[in-house]
Image (cartoon, helix red, strand yellow):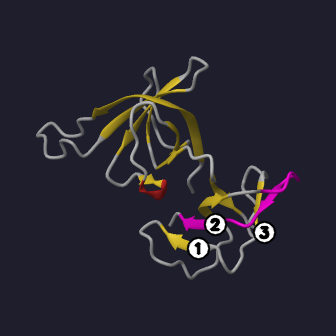
Amino acid sequence: MINFAFFSGVVTMISDFVMSPNGEAEGCYKQFSVENGAGSMVNFIVSPTTYFIDHARVSIGDRITGYHDANAPVPLIYPPRYNALIIVKENNSQNVKVDYFNEQLVSRDGQLKLNISLYTQILIANGQPFTGNLANRNLIVIYGPATKSIPAQTMPYKVIVWC
């Protein structure tokens, strides 16, 4: 099971990242350097399989949140370098939550409960409809307003099942 962790900040540099010595993957991998404004910095390795919410194109100066697997091994270097699983380009008109949701559709951290409506798009990462049960899965939830209760409750616009 993936233990999602995230880092938010402003992209300060985008560069090619060399994955193989023979150059066969040249240009396919990128490194995004991200600074959070409080002195912390990380480098995200962006691969062809990294999922970008709404297929957003990211540029230097954009505010993003990168999600990675906290249980995955990482090299002991500074700044830390994480393999990005999901990238969210910040957008004031929507919120995004990436987490494991239990049988009551409450996030692992207990901060968000989903109330699925007939209008909620439920998809898998490749854009095809998901027809299974959402409970006990890793989900990418795109939503607008939420209650101020704990957990906050929302009717999401879109749920992407991270299979």
Q: Is residue 159 above or below residue 76?
A: below
* Label of residue 121 in the image: 1
Q: Are marks 1 and 2 in contact (CB under 8 Å)?
A: yes
Residue name at image x 55 percent, y 43 percent? 90
Residue 65 lies in what quarter of the image?
top right
Residue name at image x 69 percent, y 57 percent? 144
Q: Of the residues shown, which amino acid type is indicated by label 2?
A: Tyr
User: Helix or strand or loop: what does disc 2 sit on?
Assistant: loop
Q: Nearer the viewer, residue 66 or 62?
A: 62
**Foreground disc of the pair 3, 1:** 1
**Mark toward the start of the polypeptide (1 vs 2):** 1
Q: Are marks 3 and 1 in contact (CB under 8 Å)?
A: no
Q: Of the residues shown, which amino acid type is indicated by label 3?
A: Gln
Q: Which residue is mark 2?
A: 157
Q: Of the residues shown, which amino acid type is indicated by label 1?
A: Gln
**Spatial CA span between label 3 and label 2:** 18 Å
Q: What is the crowding at mark 3: few (fewer than 14 residues within 10 Å), some, or many (at least 20)?
A: few
User: Helix or strand or loop: what does disc 1 sit on?
Assistant: strand
In the image: residue 62, left or right of residue 1: left
Q: Is residue 67 above or below residue 117?
A: above
Q: Which residues are magenta?
A: 146-161
Q: What is the crowding at mark 1: few (fewer than 14 residues within 10 Å), some, or many (at least 20)?
A: some
Counting from the top left corner in percent of width and height, residue 159 is at 60, 66
Q: Is residue 157 above or below residue 145?
A: below
Residue 1 lies in what quarter of the image?
bottom right
Q: Are marks 3 and 2 in contact (CB under 8 Å)?
A: no
